[in-house]
Amino acid sequence: MQQAIAAYEVAIDNLESVRNDLTSFNNLDLKFSFQDTIEPIFRELVDLLLPYDPNAEVRKSNSSTQESLQQIGETQEALQKAQKAIEDLQVAELENFLRCRLTNTQSVPIYQIIDEENLNTAVIYSIILDDRLEVILKLPKNLAPKNKQFIRYTTLVSKNDVENTANNFLNEIKQGLSAEEKGSELYQWLLKQADENHLRNSNIKTLVFVLDGALRNIPIAALYDGKNYIVRNYSIALSLGIQLTKQQPLKKRKI
């Protein structure tokens, strides 16, 4: 497993080194090549980093404290690598569409700025795999449980079901129909576990979503928890996965 992960990481590093050349070609064939050959590399890496194991929680509860902390540490490393792969895929897709580079050496992940500024903001990353939807919650450092800033939630739902539900949700809203049923289903997939287990009691004020595929098209503020739309509980922001340039504060001077 580790050898396979290493091989995929090398492949993505090699892609990174030639992305300048790839984005300079305005070629329709290259666009389809990205979808067929490049995009799957990122998704398959996430699939390897986040294998679905229904017995993981059972083993964890039976292990010693030291072993549990070690497992959490290993999981945090895998989750952070998966989060980076999701972010890199988002950027690669956008660069492939715009035919230009969007990042530079001074860019940092959005969660790093949140941690440094001690903001009450959580970031929610999603990635659609063939047989499941993976969600990674990144809690701010000042509010996260010890050794657990990255938290994973898995929903066993097919890629087709996610795409169909997202498209139907969007169409119902466009037609002025009640979309609470589809909005509730998407809420359960994307947010319910994180909301009930971590967000409501953590003084989180803002949610930043980094969404994948068809989920990028939905009005995320209209997700429905059974009582309210989530925009009534949180401020909502969307990110394309692009890292931000870290700004240096201006020196204070008397005028």
Image (cartoon, rainbow, N blue to C red):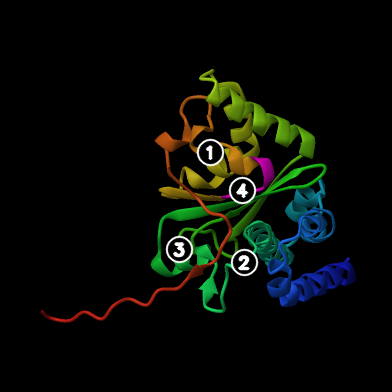
Q: How many marks?
A: 4
Of the two numbered discs 3 and 1 on the same chain, state the one appearing first in sequence: 3
Which residue is label 3 attached to? 114
Give the quarter of the image for residue 160: top right
Relative to 230, residue 54 above or below = below
Please provide percent x and percent y for residue 231: 43, 37
At x 77% / y 42%, what residue is drawn? Answer: 132
Q: Nearer the viewer, residue 251 or 49?
A: 251
Of the two numbered discs 2 and 1 on the same chain, state the one appearing first in sequence: 2
At x 75% / y 32%, what residue is drawn? Answer: 161
Decide: few, some or many residues near mark 1? Use Cα within 10 Å; few <14, some 14-19, many ≥20: many
The C terminus lies in quadrant: bottom left
Q: Which residues are magenta?
A: 210-214
C-alpha distance separating marks 3 and 1: 21 Å
Which residue is label 2 attached to? 100
Residue 179: mark: none
Relative to 150, residue 185 above or below = above
